[in-house]
Amino acid sequence: MAYTIPLIIKTIPPKGYHIFVDGKIGRHKMRFLIDTGASKSVINQDYAQNHFSNSLITKTDHLTTGLGANIPNSSFIRLHRVKLDKFSLKTVHFALLDLSMVNQAYSSAGLDPVEAIIGGDILKKYGAVIDYGNKQLIMNEQ
């Protein structure tokens, strides 16, 4: 079964666009950035530590590349009850990263900060289709 999730399309100067969806993790409402260029989904590490401190965090000695930097000893958090609009995801493993640089750029562009990024891992898993014309993200149940 396919679910249609409304996209929020914002202009990023100069002449660029970023896409977002509203959702929540548990009872925490948030806006997710949809990033087809991100291999893994990410949550802001400070936000995760402040709101999900009881969740399982695992560390790895693998080198992770993200946001223009190589990060040794990455950490991941496993979260449940993740929803994009009304579409429920099964357990999601988010990489923990500092998103302050992203949010500084968004602030300069007059955009609200993001606390989480939906990357290629989730988009592929659910056979996502981004329909810019109809401003919707289509996700398929597994």
Image: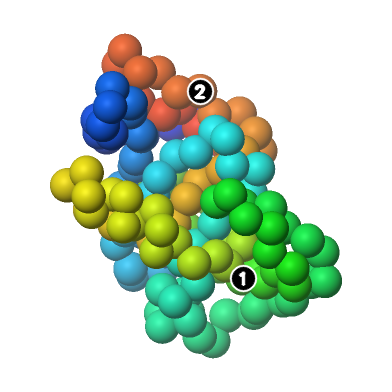
Query: As displayed, is residue 110 above or below residue 120?
Result: below
In this view of the protein, which residue sits in the foreground, 51 or 59?
A: 59
Determine which residue is flagged by label 1.
77
Determine which residue is flagged by label 2.
129
For label 1, count other residues whose C-alpha is less than 10 Å away and answer few (under 14), some (14-19) or many (20+). Answer: many
Q: Decide if residue 86 is in sight here.
A: no
Give the amino acid type for the residue marked by disc 2 in the picture. Answer: Val
Q: Quadrant of residue 36?
A: top right
Q: Quadrant of residue 75?
A: bottom right
Where does the image place residue 63, in percent across and percent down from the top left?
A: 78, 61
Residue at 50% x, 85% y: name it. Answer: 53
Asked if residue 128 lies left or right of residue 107, the reply is right
Give the farthest residue toward the left. 110
Where does the image place residue 66, in percent across and percent down from the top left?
A: 61, 52
Please name the colour scheme applied to the rendered image. Answer: rainbow
For label 2, count other residues whose C-alpha is less than 10 Å away and answer few (under 14), some (14-19) or many (20+). Answer: some
Q: Decide if residue 49 is in sight here.
A: yes
Where does the image place residue 111, in percent across and percent down from the top left?
A: 21, 47
Give the amino acid type for the residue marked by disc 1 in the picture. Answer: Ile
